[in-house]
Amino acid sequence: MAELVSTIAGKIKEINIKVGQMVTEDDEAFIIEAMKMENVVYGEAGIVKEITVQVGDSVEEDGVLAIIE
């Protein structure tokens, strides 16, 4: 299993993956807004097992966003 983690502290603006979805390293999984800039978190190859955040949640740097199997 792999964890998708936040690359920066900020607020979840978009979640572009769903539980059960197959994702790759090129997929834009999450958009995090920090200091009025958008940062993209890309996927890991595998199937989304769990999403641990919702749109509007605040996250810390290296916070777990999703579990990939």
Image: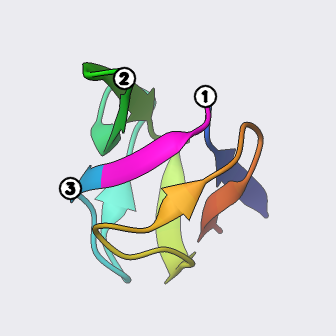
Q: Are marks 2 and 1 in contact (CB under 8 Å)?
A: yes
Q: CA distance from mark 3 to mark 2?
A: 13 Å
Q: Main secondary structure of the magenta part?
A: strand
Check disc 3 and give the amino acid type.
Answer: Asn
Tell me how the rendering is colored: rainbow
Answer with the quarter of the image where residue 7 lies.
top right
Could you tell me which residue is drawn at 49 percent across and 41 percent down?
10
- The answer to whether residue 24 is left or right of residue 13 is right
In the depicted view, which residue is nearer to us: 14 or 20?
14
Residue 49: mark: none
Category of crowding for the residue at label 3, using alpha-carbon neighbours closer than 10 angstroms: few (below 14), some (14–19), many (at least 20)? few
Expressed as whole percent of the image width and height from the top left, the position of residue 2 reads: 75, 55
The residue tagged 1 is: 8
Check disc 2 and give the amino acid type.
Answer: Asn
The residue tagged 2 is: 39
- Residue 26 on the magenta span: no
User: Where's the N terminus, which quadrant?
Assistant: bottom right
Whichever of labels 2 and 1 marks the residue nearer the N terminus, that label is: 1
Expressed as whole percent of the image width and height from the top left, the position of residue 50 reads: 55, 82
The residue tagged 3 is: 16
Answer with the quarter of the image where residue 59 lies.
bottom right
Check disc 1 and give the amino acid type.
Answer: Ile
Expressed as whole percent of the image width and height from the top left, the position of residue 11 reads: 41, 50
Category of crowding for the residue at label 2, using alpha-carbon neighbours closer than 10 angstroms: few (below 14), some (14–19), many (at least 20)? some
Q: CA distance from mark 1 to mark 3?
A: 18 Å
